[in-house]
Amino acid sequence: MSGEAQRAVEPLSMVERRIIGVLVEKARTVPDSYPMSINALVVGCNQKSNRDPLMELDDAEIQDCLDVLIKKKLVGRVVGGRVERWRHFLYEVWALNKPEIAVVAELLLRGPQTEGELRARSSRMEVIPDLESLRQILENLIERRLVVALGPLDRRGSQVTHGFHAPEELEGLLQRSSSAGDEPSMRSELRSGGLEELRQRVADLEEKVSELTNRLDRQVHRPV
C-alpha cells in the first residue's frame, strides 16, 4: 500500500508534532505543570530524552507553531493569570481515550517504534499491561489512520509510526522498513528490552527537571 493510501487526514510539521506530543506527555506525567507556558514548552520540546529527533527550538518558533495549531483547533490558550498557558484538545478533536492518546503521543515524540518499545514508553503515561492490549489499541488507531504500520504487526520487530507524516516522508519510512528485512528489526527488538529501563530512568529525571522549571516559572511570575 502506498504512503498516500495510508496517510492520515492532515499532515503535521515536525514542530507541530513535537508540541502536541509534549502537551500530552506533560499533562499525563507532570500534571502540576499543565497547562504549559511557552518557557515550559521550549524546555519540553528540546529535552534530550524521550525525543527523536533532538531539537533546539526557541520561544518564537514555538509561538509561531502554536498560532498554526490554534487554527487547526488542536490547541488553545488558557485565559487567566499573568503567564500565557496552553493546552491540547486531542481528546475532543481526535476522540481518543487515555491509552490511545499515550500511544499517539509517544509516536509523535519519537517516530517509528517496535511494539515492545512503544508499550514500555507509553506506559509512563498510561499503563498498557501487555502486548496483546497494545495490539488492540494499534489496530483501532490504524483503522482510523492515526497510526500507520510500517510492516505486518505479526512480524517480530515490525515498526509502527503516527499517521501525520507528509506523504513523501511516510513513503520514505515505508521503503526503509521494506528494505531493512527481518534480521535488523529483530536485533532492534532485542536491544530495546535491555536499554529501555535505563532510558526510562533518564526520562523520569527529565520530567522532574521540567516540573521544577515550571514551578519556578510560576513563582517568578506570581503577583507580589
Image (cartoon, rainbow, N blue to C red):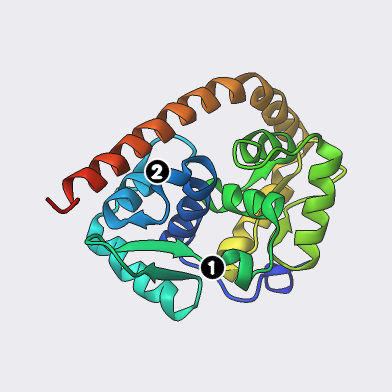
Does dot 1 land on a helix, a strand or a loop? loop
Q: Residue at x 79, y 52 (%)?
A: 137
Is 220 positioned to the left or the right of 157 in the image? left
User: Which of pointers 1 and 2 lies earlier in the amino acid sequence?
Assistant: 2
Residue 147 sits in quarter: bottom right
Image mark for residue 89: 1
Amino acid at the residue labelled 1: Phe
Residue at label 2?
A: 54
Q: Residue at x 51, y 47 (%)?
A: 25
Q: CA distance from mark 1 to mark 2?
A: 25 Å
Residue 110 in the image: x percent, y percent?
Answer: 54, 45
Q: Residue at x 25, y 47 (%)?
A: 218
Residue 107 in the image: x percent, y percent?
Answer: 60, 50
Residue lying furthest front in this view? 224
Is 71 positioned to the left or the right of 39 in the image? right
Crowding near the residue tagged with mark 2, few <14, some 14–19, many ≥20 C-alpha atoms within 10 Å = some
Is 17 positioned to the left or the right of 1 in the image? left
